[in-house]
Amino acid sequence: MTVDEKRKLELKTMYQIVGIYCHDKHHTPKGKLCEDCEQVWQYAQHRIDVCPHMAHKTFCSVCKTHCYAPIYREKVREIMRYGGPRMMFVSPIQVIKHMYLEWKDRKQHTK
Ligand SMILES: [Zn+2]
């Protein structure tokens, strides 16, 4: 998997999770985000775009550098906690792929 592909998969996963969260919690129509969630999503997008570690890690969840500003970090954590498990029902293959890559990365780093 290339760095670009990783970045794209991370973005796609993130967007879906924010979407699930916003749809359930803020009752926004599917495919839309409310103002608050849009802001979090824009921020996350930017972080993923500029992440200097993409080349040698897989996803933000395994990263040692916590590049999110505290105010967004809390929000993202809440969104992830809610939307993460629900992703299993929306696109299980994508989640499994994500988990596998994460696991591979962790194994490499602990050697
Ligand atoms: Zn929302």
Image (cartoon, grey):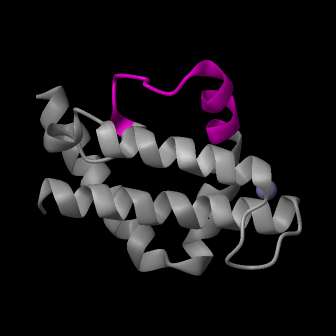
Nearest the viewer among 9 and 99 is 9
Q: Which of 32/86 is in front?
A: 32
Seen in the picture, residue 21 relative to 54 is either above or below; the reply is below
Residue 110, position as x, y percentages in the image: 18, 28
User: Residue placed at 35% from the left, 37% from the top?
Assistant: 62
- Which residue is rendered at x = 71% and y = 51% of the image? 37
Q: In this picture, is 92 found above or below 80? A: below
The mark tally for this picture is 0
Q: Which residues are magenta?
A: 62-77
Picture coordinates of residue 39 (x, y %)?
66, 46
Residue in the picture at 25% in, 38% down = 106
Which quarter of the image is occupied by the N terminus? bottom left
Q: Is residue 65 left or right of residue 57?
A: right
Residue at the spot x=59%, y=51% of the render?
Answer: 41
Q: Is residue 64 magenta?
A: yes
User: Where residue 11 sits: x, y (%)?
Assistant: 42, 59
- Depth order, front residue of 110/95: 95
Q: Residue 99: percent from the left, percent from the top?
A: 37, 57
The answer to which image quadrant residue 23 occupies is bottom right
> Within the displayed image, which quadrant is ligand 1 positioned in?
bottom right
**The C terminus sits in image quarter:** top left
Q: Is residue 41 left or right of residue 8?
A: right
Give above or below for 30 relative to 27.
below
Based on the picture, tell me whether residue 22 belongs to the magenta stretch: no
